[in-house]
Amino acid sequence: MKKKIILSAYGIFGILALTVAVFFIYTSDYYHADPEILSQFADKNSSVTVVERDDNITVYSPENGSEYGLIFYPGALVESEAYAPLLTSIAERGITCICADMPFNLAIFGIDRAKEIIPSFDNIRHWYIGGHSLGGAMASSFAAGYEGSLDGLVLFAAYSVSDISKSGLNVISVYGSNDGVLNKDAYDNKRKNLPEKINELVIKGGCHSYFGAYGMQEGDGVPTVSRDDQVTVTAQYVSECIKNNK
C-alpha cells in the first residue's frame, strides 16, 4: 500500500512537472517586435515622449499632455514593444497611452494591471481601457468590474467576454476585413455583451497582425492595405471617438 502511494505521488509530480515544462515552452515562443519595422517607424519625426517605467509600463505622452488616457493590453504572446507604432500614433492625436507588460506575455495573467495604473496619473480625467485580440478580451473583463473608473473600452480585433451591455461605457471596436485570426462567429455572438450602440470600424483590407509590428501572425489573412495605413486609420478613428465620447 505504501509503495502504491509513493508511486502515485511520483506520478502526480511527473504530471505537474510536464505541465510546467509545456507551459514554459509555450510561452517562450512568442512574437517579438520586428526591429526593421520599428526602425522605419523610429525614423519618423514624432512629438510623443516615450518613457519605460520601472513598474513594467510604457507611457506614450502627447506633447502638450492630455486629460484622456488609454490603458492598452497587448495580444497573446506578443511583445509589448510591437505596439509602439499604434500607441505613438494615437498619442500624437492627443491621447496618453499606457502599455502594460503582461506576465508571460499573456494578459489573462494581468487582468487587473489597470487597477494599479489609474491612480498614478492625476492629470487624466477620462480613462479608457483596451487591447489587441486576447488583450482586448481581458480588458473587457476588467471593465466589467470597474465601470465607475472608466469612460470606455477599445477593442482592437477583439470581443468582450464579459457583459457590459448596461455599463454606459463608450465602446469602440476596430478590426480588419481580412483578419484571419479573429473568430468572427464569436465576435458576432458576443455582440450581446456590448451596449446597443457602439462605434465600429471595419478596415477594408486590414488584417489582425497589422495592429502591431511583429510580422505576420500564423493563420492571418492577406492584407491589401499597408501596415502604416491601418495604424493611421485606426489611430484617427479611436482618438476621435475617445475625444468626442460618441
Image (cartoon, rainbow, N blue to C red):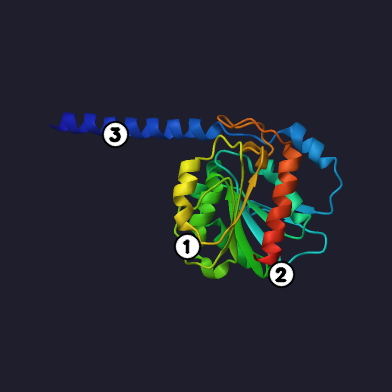
Q: Is residue 141 visible?
A: yes
Q: Is residue 51 visible?
A: no
Q: CA distance from mark 2 to mark 1?
A: 29 Å
Disc 2, disc 3: CB below 8 Å? no
Placement of 229 over or under 162, stated as above or below:
above
Q: Nearer the viewer, residue 60 or 153?
A: 153
Q: Residue at the spot x=75%, y=65% of the render?
A: 66
How many residues crowd around disc 1 within 10 Å: few (fewer than 14), some, or many (20 or more)?
Answer: some
Q: Is residue 182 left or right of residue 211?
A: left
Number of dots carrying numbers: 3
Q: Secondary structure at mark 1?
A: loop
How many residues crowd around disc 2 within 10 Å: few (fewer than 14), some, or many (20 or more)?
Answer: few
Residue 67, percent across and down? 72, 68
Q: Nearer the viewer, mark 2 or mark 3?
A: 2
Q: CA distance from mark 2 to mark 3?
A: 52 Å
Q: Label 1 belongs to which residue?
A: 165
Q: Amino acid at mark 3?
A: Ile
N-terminal label among 2 and 3: 3
N-terminal label among 1 and 3: 3
Q: Amino acid at mark 2?
A: Asn
Specify the label residue 123 is tagged with: 2
Q: Residue at the spot x=74%, y=33% of the render?
A: 35
Residue 171, percent across and down? 58, 59
Image quarter in which the C terminus is found:
bottom right
Q: Nearer the viewer, mark 1 or mark 3?
A: 1
Q: Label 3 belongs to which residue?
A: 12
